Image (tube, grey):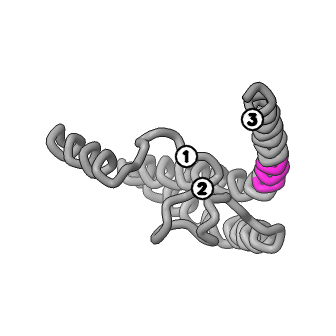
Amino acid sequence: MAWDEWERIKGEVAGTGGSGGMRLNSAPGGGGGGGGDGDLRVSQQELAAIGGHAFQLFQRLGKEGRGPVAATLAAARDLSGQEFALGGALQRVQERWGQQVRSLVDACGHISNGLDAAQKIHRSDEHFVARTVSSIAQLTTAFDEEAERRR
């Protein structure tokens, strides 16, 4: 972002009466986001669908991801036996491919666990934020009541 663009945006916010400060429990109207209420939400059904796709990918990678390993290694041995440098290179490619497939299979296996943990963490964070905002509201009410009483 260029400096002049930053200055223009600051001027727009100041000109519209915006405070330019933090906005709690609200999101700007218009675009972006899902429900428009500013909360991040995900349902168990959505997480289950993502986990299901990860499991299907896990299964397919396990079956199909390694490709024709035996044929590739046999070709590599044959080429090496005939003193072609390509034989060793082909073997290294097959080994590297196998490592990459194992990494992907492991990653797919971790997705479901990660989704479960994320949902628990976010649920806990949501409760913490709600408790904090509630206690702030109680303090504000108490201060307002005290100010009214002193008048």
Q: Is residue 48 left or right of residue 7?
A: right
The answer to whether residue 101 is seen in the rendering is: yes
Quarter of the figure with residue 142? top right
- Disc 1 + disc 2, Cβ < 8 Å: yes
| Comes first in the chain, label 1 or label 3 | 1
Lateral position of residue 26 relative to residue 50, left or right? left
Residue 55 image point, x, y percent = 77, 68
Q: Give the quarter of the image for residue 150.
A: top right
6 in relation to 62, above or below:
above
- Determine the residue positioned at 54% across, 55% down: 97
Q: Are the two marked residues, 1 and 3, in contact with CB atoms closer than 8 angstroms?
A: no
**Can you say which quadrant of the picture contains the C terminus?**
top right
Name the residue located 49 percent from the left edge and 67 percent from the top edge. Answer: 29
Disc 2 marks which residue? Answer: 26
- Range of residues picked out in magenta: 115-124
Q: Main secondary structure of the magenta part?
A: helix
Point out which mark residue 119 bears: none
Residue 19: give x, y in percent of width and height.
Answer: 43, 43
Residue under label 3: 144
133 or 96, which lies in front? Answer: 133
Which residue: 57% across, 61% down? 74
Residue topped by disc 1: 23
Callout 2 secondary element? loop
- The stretch drawn in magenta includes residue 123: yes
Q: CA distance from mark 3 to mark 2?
A: 23 Å
For the residues marked 1 and 3, what is the alpha-carbon distance in whole angstroms? 21 Å
Three-letter code, disc 2: Ser
